[in-house]
Image (spheres, rainbow, N blue to C red):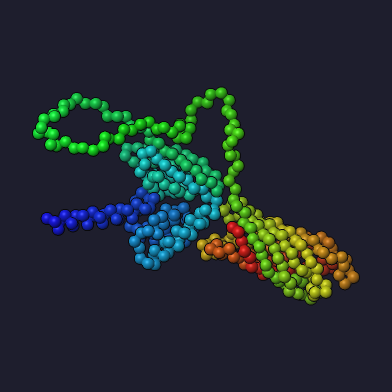
Amino acid sequence: MKAASIARVLAGAAVLAVTATAAASPLAEPGDPATRCARGVELAARDDLPRALLYLTGCDEAALTDDLARDATRALRDVKQRLRASQLSELQIVTTPPGLVIELDALAGEKLRSPVSVWVAAGTHTVRAAGDGIAIQNTVTTEPFSRATLLLDAGTRPPASPTDGSVDFTEENALEQTSGPPPDIEHPSLMSDKYRGIAGPRVGPELADPLAIRAAPRARPWLGLRVGGGAFDDGETAVAVRPALAATARFALAERVFLAARLDWSRRGGAADVAIDAVGASAGAGYTLLARPQLALAAIVQLRGSLHFADTRDGMPVNALGAGAAAALELAFPRTPLSAGVRLESSFTELVPGARDRALLLELGVDWR
């Protein structure tokens, strides 16, 4: 008899352990942890970051093989970092009662268990919740680089109708009585209709809140420093290898499109006795060709203006101002602040009469992303 009881206890403990492991995922039916975590690693490799986070949540604490645990933990860390740096918005979905099955158009086909946190693109999203005879729906609008909360409240259910009956307090019945806390009593929600998405009639003119924060969330600029050098040629003097320094900045416009600005110093014009110091400012746009947890590759095209600090060279006047164009490829390593790039510059205007300068630069940089 004791052996059977012990067996039942161990079986119950095993069921609880599996349930606790599965419950670590926000999915309504998380399934086998190994299968779920392997699916999350696959989604992360395909850049499906919002779905990858759903499948990878809890994988850092699940009982997995060494290889899968290492890949899942690394993928979970990378996905969280890339989501925070992206233009997606974090949406918290809360239901009353909790534990309802959540579906939303941004993650079609996925069933989640409330409360849950998901990442979605900026825009208007429809969210549905169902379970225990309840079916509710609402919409929410999110902005880039922001957080939002949506409450789906099913309301209070009417109490059961009273029925006629009798109570027997005889000694025989007293032995069958049980003790415990009184049952929970449901009360109407204390939250205002305004915060539950229920619009009420407006009385009088609408007044602006002077303390409200109206600034839209903005993406952080990507700042960097570059040190490098390369070959400078103006067609009149011998090609020379000279140093260059630069400060750069990126400003996101869309998920892969950004504005690019640059301020640099370089020494141009051939040999040391005829070299000319130049300060340049560039502005243009760029596009991220490749975005991976290990590396990112971007192409940049800019217009460039320059100021030359010399009056004459070999008896010929130096044009104080110059204009040109530049094209660059920049390789960044997201897990570190380091980057590397190659840059080609060509002038539209003459440095000295009959000579336009060109430059091919190789650069290493440090970025604050």
Q: Is residue 334 left or right of residue 182?
A: right
174 or 76, nearer to the observer: 174
Where does residue 264 sit, x and y in percent of width and height? 72, 62
Residue in the image at 66% along x and 65% along y: 226
* Residue 209 quadrant: top right
Q: How many dots with numbers?
A: 0
In the orientation shown, which residue stands out farthest toward the right? Answer: 315
Q: Is residue 252 left or right of residue 292?
A: right
Where does residue 93 sit, x and y in percent of width and height? 43, 43
> Which quadrant does the C terminus fall into?
bottom right
Q: Does 266 appear above or below 126?
A: below
Where does residue 297 sit, x and y in percent of width and height? 58, 63
Residue in the image at 58% along x and 55% along y: 256
Where does residue 248 sit, x and y in percent of width and height? 67, 59
In the orientation shown, which residue stands out farthest toward the top? Answer: 204
367 or 175, nearer to the observer: 175
Q: Does 325 appear above or below 170?
A: below
Residue 242 in sight:
yes
Residue in the image at 14% along x and 37% along y: 176
Residue in the image at 19% along x and 55% along y: 8
* Residue 247 quadrant: bottom right
> Which quadrant does the N terminus fall into?
bottom left
* Residue 185 quadrant: top left
Q: Is residue 11 left or right of residue 263?
A: left
